[in-house]
Image: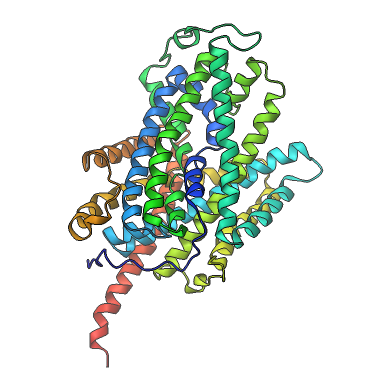
Amino acid sequence: MSQAPLRELAEEPLGHGLKQRHLTMLGLGGVIGAGLFVGSGAGISLAGPGIVLSYLLAGTLAMLVMRMLGEMSAAMPASGSFSVHAERAMGRWAGFSVGWLYWFLLVVVLAVEATGAAKIANGWVPGIPQWGWVLIFMLVFTASNLAAVRNFGEFEFWFAALKVGAIVLFLLLSTLAIFGLLPDTDPVGLTNLTGQGGFLPNGWSGVVSGVLAVVFAFGGLEVVTIAAAESDDPARSVARAVRSAVWRILFFYIGSMLVIVTLLPWTAMKPGESPYVAVLDSIGIPGAGQIMNIVVFVALLSALNANLYGSSRMVFSLAERGEAPRALLTVSGGGVPRRAVFASVAFGFVSVVLNLLWPKTIFLYMLNAVGAVLLFVWALIAVSQLLLRRRIERETPERLTLKMWAFPYLTWAALAGMAAVLMLMLTDDEARPQLLWSTGAAAAVLVVAGIRELRARRAAQAGPAGP
C-alpha cells in the first residue's frame, strides 16, 4: 500500500467563517442533547447511584477518542477529519468505509432528532401534525446550512450556549438544594447515595449496564474536528477546542449525575422520563416539566443542525477523494457545498413520509439501524491514530502540537474498552438487535469498499498494457 507524504495537505475550497468561540461552543454543546437530559434516566434505573461511575467510564472513553482526534486533526486539518486520517493510515478502503458509515449515522440521527423535536412541538401545537413539524424543521435547517458557514456557527453558538447555561443553572440550584440553602429545603446528606441498596445496588454489573445505556450519549464530539477545517487557523483552533471541551463535558455529565442521585432516591427514576425534571420538581421550581421540554427541544434542534453540517462536509470530503459522486463538489460563492447539503438532508425529507405513515414506531427502528455504528467509527479512529502517530513523528514532527496522552498505551486501552462495550451489546437482549443491524450496515459498506479496491488494482495493473 503506497502512502502519500504527510506534507501534502490540500487547501480546502470551503469557507473559513468559523471563529474560535464557535468551535469551542460546538465542542461543548455537540454532545449535550436528549441522551443526557432524558436518556440518563434509563442508566440511573440500571446502576443506581453507581451511574456516576458509568458516566465516568463512558466519558473517559469518549475523552480518549477526542484526544486522538484532536492530535490527528491539529496535525492534518481536513473537512473529512477522521475519514481522511483513516485513508492516510490504512488506504482508500478505510477512508471510504469510515466516511460513509459516519455519513449514514449522521443522516439517520438527524432524522431521529427531527422526529423527537416534532413530538414535543406537536404537544405544544397539536394543530400541526408530527410529520408537518419534521418538514418545517428540515426546511429551516436546510436553509441555514445553505447560507454562509458563519451562520451555522452562530446558530450552534447560541443553541449550545442555552444548553450549557441550562446545565450550569441546574447544577447551581441542585447544589444549593443539597445543602438546604433553597426555600423549603433541608440538607439531604448522603441518604440517597447509601440507602436503597447502597451506592452500587446492582453491583458492578449494574455499573457496566449503565455504561451500555449512556456511552452513545457522547456521540457528536467528532463534529468539532470536521468544523475546524473551516476556521481561520484550523490546527490551532481544533487543539484549543479539544482541550477546553473534554474536561468541561465530563464535568457537566458527571456533575449532573452526582447531584441527581444525591437529591433523589434512584428507585424514583423511570426510563424515558427526565431525571432533570424530577429534580426540578422536587426543589419546587414551577413549570419544571415545560422548562426542560424547551431545553430538550433546543438540544434536539441543535444536534440536527450540527449533524446536517457534519454529514454534508463528510460527503463533500468523500467526493474530493473520488469516493462519492463528483457532482457533490459544487461549492457556492460563500464556500458552502450546497449539493452535499441537499444529499445529506434528503433522508430527513424521507423521514417526513415515514412520520406520516408510522409516527409511533419509526423512531425506534431508525435508532436500531445505527446503534453501534458510532463504536465502529471510534475504533477506526483509534487504529488510524496508532498508525499515523509514528509517521507524523518521522515526517512532520512540528505538527504534533496536541499529543495523545501516554501513547500508545491509552490508545490500546480505548480500543479494549470499545471491544468490551460491543461484547456487552452482544449479550444484552435489548442492545443485540442494534449491534446486529449496525454490523450488517458496516459489512455492506466494507464489501463495497473491497470491490472498489479490487477494481482499482485491476485497472492499475491493466494500465501499462494499454496502447
Q: Quadrant of residue 170?
A: top right
Can residue 381 be seen by looking at this rendering?
A: yes
> At 55% from the left edge and 28% from the top edge, which residue is drawn?
168
Q: Quadrant of residue 77?
A: bottom left
Q: How far from the left and from the top, in percent, is residue 464?
A: 23, 85
- When the figure is inspected, residue 440 is found, relative to residue 125, above or below; the finding is below
**Residue located farthest toward the right when viewing the structure as drawn:** 127
For the residue pair 411 and 130, the one nearer the viewer reads as 411
Quadrant for the N terminus, please.
Answer: bottom left
Q: How far from the left and from the top, in percent, is residue 74?
A: 34, 53
Decide if residue 52 is on the left or right side of residue 3.
right
Quadrant for the C terminus, please.
Answer: bottom left
Count how many numbered circles sit on residues in the image. 0
- When the figure is inspected, residue 355 is found, relative to residue 13, above or below; the finding is above
For the residue pair 261 and 462, the one nearer the viewer reads as 261
Decide if residue 28 is on the left or right side of residue 407.
right
Q: How far from the left and from the top, in percent, is residue 289?
A: 68, 26
For the residue pair 440 and 373, the one nearer the viewer reads as 373
> At 47% from the left edge and 59% from the top edge, which residue is drawn?
230
For the residue pair 289 and 79, the one nearer the viewer reads as 79
Q: How far from the left and from the top, in percent, is residue 238?
A: 40, 50
> At 60% from the left edge and 49% from the top edge, which residue is drawn?
155
